[in-house]
Amino acid sequence: MNQKVVQSGLPVILWVHGGSFIAGSASDPALDGTSLAASTNSIVAVVQYRLGAVSRTAELVLLADPRTQLGFLPPISLNSNTNLGAKDVVTALKFISNVVSSFGGTPGLVTLAGQSSGATLIRGLLGAPSAQSYFKNAWLHSDPFDYGFNNPGAQQNLQSAFYGGVSCESSSKTCALAMSLQSIIASQNQVFLNGPSIDPSTGASMPIRVVHDGSFITSTLTQQSFPSSLKPIIVTTANKDAGPVIFGGAPPLPPSLYTDVLEGTFSDQDTQTLENSGFYNPPTDPDADIRPELVILGTDQVWRCPTWTMSRTWSSRGGTIFTGLWVLGATYPTNTGFDICTTPGNVCHQDDIEIVFGTVANPTPAQAALVQEVQARYGAFVRTSNPNPSGFAKWTASSPSNINAINLGSSGTAATGGCIPSLWGNQVLYYYQQFGQ
């Protein structure tokens, strides 16, 4: 009788999906780990964690402890249960640690990887002491580093607004459990859309997020505080991360409105600084559409420049960090309606996911080559904390003076452009700097 031999010593990749902490699913077809597992000879798992304000999905199996049904905005009386979605990922890590050896895996070789808010959640776990022993490395894809973690005051303001929207006392567990799904979603959407008016520090794009509560998450990973031990990490962004936000939120705009649009986001002084920097110029053709220039600015503001600042800071504190820029991708299904995302050479938010997982439908030769390279780099990183397998260009770790951001999908390293220390984080402050996060 033939018996299947189970390999041993395999590393583990645990993927944390994105979705602004209110959407997303581990069952997304793009996140099929078959190709990634086979090419890296590792175990790949995708974790589902609680999303949104209040989760009732576990109601039938968790009636014994109703508190476990609550999402990111539990009643104020249950403040010790903030960050429940992030704690779900720690629970998954503990489960992996306990059982993965039965599948040939190695508990000490776990890499956390995730995209967008999934990467933000991982950033939170890098600052969570209770999570440190359960993973070795992390790869953060398109983390919106411009946003820090919510502080307890902002969290309480969001809770009050959410429960007020459903005419429910924010301290009432009973009322929270009695809410209809329709009421939950309607009030959650209002919190999501009106975050800055509820509390300016929450930001406009991802107001519901992990909380720097001082107990579970004890470090902000900004100049405010870092953990004493820094894990090897990779941080990558897409060259047009802001594409879906800009093209999905506005019609074509003429150059005459450029300053007005900037002043809708930045102060008058910051607008003038950006316009005079030489990096963010509107088109000279009066009939042109300024949205492509706004994509460059938005990408630098929210993703690329704060990520590069993080790379400089992480390395200055003795941590190993590799930085990359996606210049080739595969248009994610939700991005197919945006011209900016389907233009060759443009990589929008999420357009790196199918490359990582090898789930690109009918890849071009260039995409197939990039899948091979990225999966090989993943395979090396999860084993050695170094994304440099043989046969590919050397990826040099970042230093305080040299980012060394490799181009993923092309040769060489990315140009610094506007991501210079004298501009972003200095003259124009990041969101987390403005609110001391």
Image: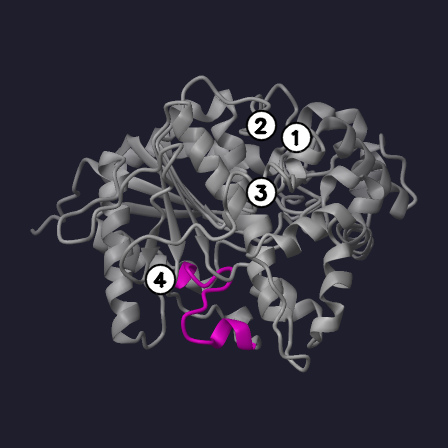
Q: Which mark is residue 355?
A: 4
Residue 257, image quadrant = bottom right
Q: Secondary structure at mark 2?
A: loop
Q: Residues within 10 Å of mark 2 (few under 14, many from 20)?
A: many
Which circle's residue, 1 or 2, is located before the other in the chain? 2
Which circle's residue, 2 or 4, is located before the other in the chain? 2
- Amino acid type at circle 4 is Ile
Mark 3 → mark 1, Cα distance in angstroms: 16 Å
Q: Nearer the viewer, mark 4 or mark 1?
A: 1
**Percent x, y for residue 424?**
58, 42
- Amino acid type at circle 1 is Gln
Provide the residue span drawn in magenta: 339-355
Q: Position of 92 compared to 222: left or right?
A: left
Label 1 belongs to which residue?
Answer: 437
Q: Nearer the viewer, residue 199 or 191?
A: 199
Q: Position of 356 compared to 56: left or right?
A: left
Q: Is residue 306 above or below residue 435?
A: below
Residues at circles 3 and 1 in contact by the CB criterion of under 8 Å: no
Which circle's residue, 2 or 3, is located before the other in the chain? 2
Q: Secondary structure at mark 4?
A: helix
Label 2 belongs to which residue?
Answer: 220
Q: Is residue 406 visible?
A: yes
Which circle's residue, 4 or 1, is located before the other in the chain? 4
The residue positioned 38% from the left and 41% from the top of the image is 403
The residue positioned 58% from the left and 21% from the top of the image is 218
